Amino acid sequence: MHQEVQSSRLKVPGATIYHEARGEGPLLLIIPGGPQDAGVFAGLAQLLADRYKVVAYDPRGNSRSAFDGEPTELNVDMQADDAARLIEELGAGPAHVFGTSGGAQIGLSLAARHPERVAVLVAHEPPAINMLDDPSAELAAAKEIHDVYRSQGVDAAMARFFAINGLEGGPGGEDGPPEFEPSPEDAETFARVSGNFDYWLAHGIMPLSLYRPDVETLRKGRPRVIVGIGEQSEGQPIYDMGLAVAKGLGSEPQMFPGDHMGFELHAELFAETLHQAFSADDLKKNDARRAGTA
C-alpha cells in the first residue's frame, strides 16, 4: 500500500532541515550520503513504511536544507547534531538509524555523540579512509577528485569519482541520466541531487573522507552499531573501509545486496535485510532485558 508522505522543516543553528515521513511504528531515520537527499530513498522508505515511521531528510547544504547564509565546510559532528535534533523534534526516539556512505559517517558520529538518541545504527559502507592500515592511496584518490573539481569543474570530477569507485550510472544522483524513462519524481530527485555536486565536491568530499569514527567510544556497545557492506563491493576500496570499521568496533559486518547503491538497485531485498538487522538487534535487547529480570 502506498504510504502518504508528510514533509516538514526543522530550524537548527545555521540552517533549516527538510525532512519527510512515511508510515507508522518505531522511528527509522535515514541519513543520505554525499550529495544525496531524501528523494533518493523514496523506494526504500515505501518498502519499510508498513513496519516503521520512516523519516528521510536532506542534510544541511543539500537540496531543500538551506544554510542561513553562505555555504560552509561540511562538519560531520555538526551534521550528527542536526540528526539528533531531528530525532528529538520527532519525539519518537531512540531511533533505528540507517546511514549510507557519507551518511554512515554522520551516523557513526551521531551514535558516539548522542547515544541516547539511537537504538541501533546500520552504517552502510562508510568511506572511513583513516580506518585503513595504510590510507595513503585512498587519501590521494580523494584529493585527486577534489583537485580535478578545482581545476576542471564538476563534470570532470564526478566522472573521476565514479571511475575510481567503480560505480555504475543510474537515477539516484550518479554519473548520468538513467537509460530508462524516469518517473517525474525520479527526474526531480536527479535534478536536485545533481545540483548538490558542486557543494559536495567543494566542501563535503574531503571532510567526509577524512572523518575517523570514534570506535573507542562506540565499542562500549551503546548503541549497537552494525556495519553494512555490499556483496558486490568486494574488490573496491569501500569494501575494505567497511571491514576496517567493523574490525575497529570488534564486530562482524552485515552483508547487504548489491554494491554502494544497493539500497536503490536492489531495494526490496535491501529493505528486508535492513529490517532483519534491526529485528535481530531488538530480539537481543529483549533477551538481555529478560535475563536481567530473571
Image (spheres, rainbow, N blue to C red):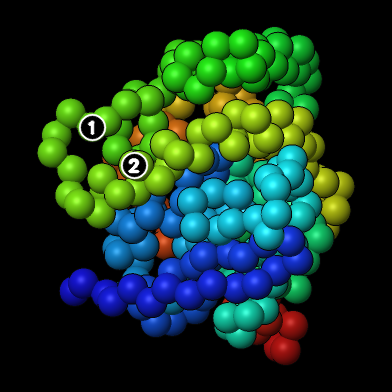
On the image, the x and y values in percent for residue 33 come to 54, 44
Reply above or below: 16 against 218: below
Q: How crowded is mark 1: few (under 14 residues within 10 Å), some or many (20 or more)?
A: some
| Residue 190 in sight from this viewpoint | yes
- Disc 1 or disc 2, which is closer to the eye? 2
SS at mark 2?
Answer: helix
Give the mark nearer the N terminus: 1 vs 2: 1
| Residue 262 in sight from this viewpoint | no
SS at mark 1?
Answer: loop
On the image, the x and y values in percent for residue 157 come to 52, 17
Labels 1 and 2 touching (C-beta < 8 A): yes
Q: Quadrant of residue 110?
A: bottom right
On the image, the x and y values in percent for residue 91 come to 61, 85
**Residue found 45% across the figure and 19% down from its top:** 155
State the mark number for residue 204.
Answer: none
Between the C-alphas of marks 1 and 2, the distance is 9 Å
Q: In this view, does 56 lie to the left or right of 216?
A: left
> Which amino acid is tagged 1?
Pro
**Residue found 25% across the figure and 54% down from its top:** 185
Reply above or below: 167 against 187: above
In this view, which residue lies farthest toward the front? Answer: 69
**Residue found 51% across the figure and 33% down from its top:** 197
> Which amino acid is tagged 2?
Phe
Q: Is residue 141 left or right of residue 163?
A: right
Which residue was labeled with disc 2? Answer: 190
Q: Of 66 and 79, which appears nearest the observer?
A: 66
Q: Of 147 and 32, which appears nearest the observer?
A: 147
Which residue was labeled with disc 1? Answer: 178
Q: Is residue 73 left or right of residue 87?
A: right
On the image, the x and y values in percent for residue 292 come to 74, 83
Q: Residues within 10 Å of mark 2 (few under 14, many from 20)?
A: many
**Residue found 73% across the figure and 61% down from its top:** 14
